[in-house]
Amino acid sequence: EGEAFIDDAIKASAEAGPAVLVLSFSTTWCGPCKLMDPKVAQLSDNFDGKARFIKIVGDKDPDGMQLMKRYGVRSVPQYHVYKGGNKVAAISGAKYDELLATLQEHASA
């Protein structure tokens, strides 16, 4: 992964399907992130073909910390939702219901 991979993924949401992209920011030491992981995995299955999920682990992935800085992520978990290449939502914290509602709004058509 890395910055170019994320750039391409955002660009792809504008050009080819799926139109919705979720960037999931976390760290290896984040407790709430671990609680959200299985729920986010389930959402990924539920919205298969409608939304693409990419997990960015700040303290583990290549460019992880740079990506968190670049997107202004100061707390985790955080979910940035893109549609058609544009950010349509940023959800901070382990807010499953809010993430689900955002996906239902943007990825259900």
Image (cartoon, rainbow, N blue to C red):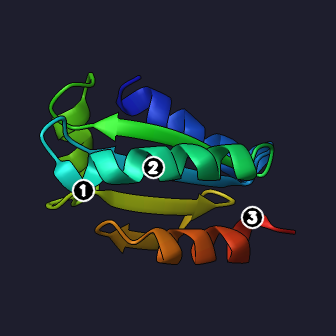
Amino acid residing under circle 3 = Ala
**For residue 18, above or below residue 55:** below
CB within 8 Å, label 2 to label 3 = no
- Image quarter where the N terminus lies is top left
**For residue 20, above or below residue 102:** above
Q: CA distance from mark 1 to mark 2?
A: 16 Å
Q: Which residue is mark 2?
A: 23
Viewer-nearest residue: 17 or 4: 17
How many residues crowd around disc 2 within 10 Å: few (fewer than 14), some, or many (20 or more)?
A: some
Amino acid residing under circle 2 = Leu
Q: Which mark is residue 107?
A: 3
Q: Which mark is residue 17?
A: none
Viewer-nearest residue: 35 or 90: 35
Q: CA distance from mark 3 to mark 1?
A: 25 Å
**For residue 62, above or below residue 66:** above
Labels 1 and 2: the sequence-earlier one: 2
Q: Nearer the viewer, mark 3 or mark 1?
A: 1
Amino acid residing under circle 1 = Pro
Q: Residue at x 55, y 43 (%)?
A: 41
Horizontal side of residue 82 vs 93, given as left or right: right
Tell me the SS state at disc 2: strand
Q: Which residue is mark 1?
A: 32
Labels 3 and 1: the sequence-earlier one: 1
Tell me the SS state at disc 3: helix
Q: Residue at x 74, y 64 (%)?
A: 107
Q: Position of residue 22 (x, y in %)?
A: 53, 53
Q: Position of residue 66 (x, y in %)?
A: 19, 38
Q: Position of residue 54 (x, y in %)?
A: 49, 39
Q: Residue at x 57, y 38 (%)?
A: 9
